[in-house]
Image: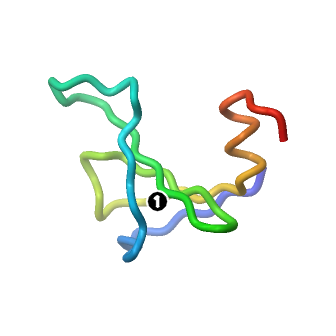
Amino acid sequence: MNTAESSTVDSGLIWFKSSYSGAEGGDCVEVAADPGVVHIRDSKAVAGPVMRVSRAAWAGFLGLPR
């Protein structure tokens, strides 16, 4: 799997919080997608590192057919 990290906030992306995140806060993951890449970050550190993976790698992580 190819991954890349960045410490910049990506403008223009629409971020979605994990459906497994509860209303009480805690550890949450957010994802945003553009045509070729899925961006993943910690919801408590929105300006922190962002991991980027291919759509195929993300589908494999979710257990979806590629």
x, y percent for residue 15: 38, 55
Q: Is residue 47 left or right of residue 12?
A: left
Q: Is residue 64 left or right of residue 30?
A: right
Q: Is residue 51 left or right of residue 58?
A: left
Q: Is residue 38 above or below residue 9?
A: above
x, y percent for residue 43: 30, 46
Q: Is residue 43 above or below residue 9?
A: above
The quarter in which the C terminus is drawn is top right
Between 34 and 28, the residue placed more toward the observer is 34
Between 16 and 51, the residue placed more toward the observer is 16
Residue that sits furthest to the right in the current view? 66
Circle 1 packing at 10 Å, graded few (<14), some (14-19), many (20+), is many
Residue that sits furthest to the left in the current view? 24
Q: Circle 1 sits in a helix, a strand or a loop, which is it?
A: strand
On the image, which quarter does residue 63 sit in?
top right
x, y percent for residue 61: 69, 34
Q: Which residue is mark 1?
A: 50
Which residue is painted at 67% across and 44% down in the image?
58
Amino acid type, label 1: Val
Which residue is painted at 71% across and 57% down in the image?
54
x, y percent for residue 44: 24, 46
On the image, which quarter does residue 53 sit in?
bottom right
